[in-house]
Amino acid sequence: MKKIILLSSMTILISCKTQLRNGKYKSNCYTTDAPSKILILDNHNKYIMIYPASVEKVGGTWKIKKDTLVLKSLYQGSLSEKDSSVYNSEIYYIIKRNKLIDPKNRKCFLIK
């Protein structure tokens, strides 16, 4: 009986762990018939955030701190050209299942 309780407790704790899958996340808010943001996470902790309306992209590294995704940008550039400039900032998203919620604007979130 103790083993069953222990296994059940461990299963619950493991399932509550913040999980984030690599891939493409799109905003549920649209600008000019396109998502306002598209986030691409790769398995080498690199990311690209695309802003289709302004034809810009921001890239850098990502990491998880508890239930928060931290995007540390390293460069900003144009989608149409290969130019880029150094750009340092941090963006935070709260991880809720397959959603990434912006704490500043909870209505517009990114979804897998």
Image (spheres, rainbow, N blue to C red):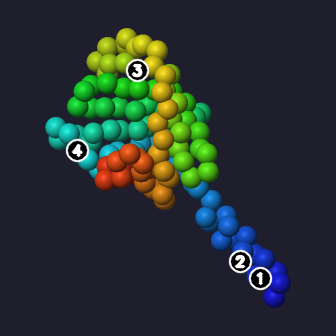
Dot placed on the residue nearer the N-terminal end, 1 or 3: 1
Residue 8's label in the rendered image is 2
Residue type at numbered disc 2: Ser
Which is in the foreground here, disc 3 or disc 2? Answer: 3
User: Which residue is at 67% across, 64% downward?
Assistant: 14
Q: Amino acid at mark 1?
A: Ile
Nearer the observer, disc 1 or disc 3? Answer: 3
> What is the secondary structure assignment of the residue under circle 4?
strand
Looking at the picture, how far across and down is residue 50, in whole percent?
A: 35, 32
Give the residue drawn at x 41%, y 38%.
39
CA gap, disc 2 to disc 4?
42 Å
Q: CA distance from mark 1 to mark 4?
A: 48 Å
Q: Tell me if label 2 and label 1 are in contact, CB under 8 Å.
A: yes
- Furthest toward the front, the residue is 104
Above or below residue 3? Residue 85 is above
Residue at the farthest left position: 32
Where is residue 22 shown, x and y percent of the image?
51, 44
Residue farthest to the bottom? 1
Query: Circle 4 is placed at which residue position?
Result: 30
The kind of residue tagged 4 is Tyr
Amino acid of disc 3: Gln
Q: Earlier in the sequence, mark 2 or mark 4?
A: 2
Give me the residue at 75% from left, 75% from top. Answer: 7
Which sits earlier in the primary sequence, circle 4 or circle 3?
4
Q: Residues within 10 Å of mark 2 (few under 14, many from 20)?
A: few
* Between discs 3 and 2, the one toward the N terminus: 2
State how far apart marks 3 and 2 are (Cα).
47 Å
Q: Is residue 10 above or below residue 102?
A: below
Residue 24, compared with residue 97, is above or below; it is above
Q: Secondary structure at mark 3?
A: strand
Residue at the spot of label 3: 76
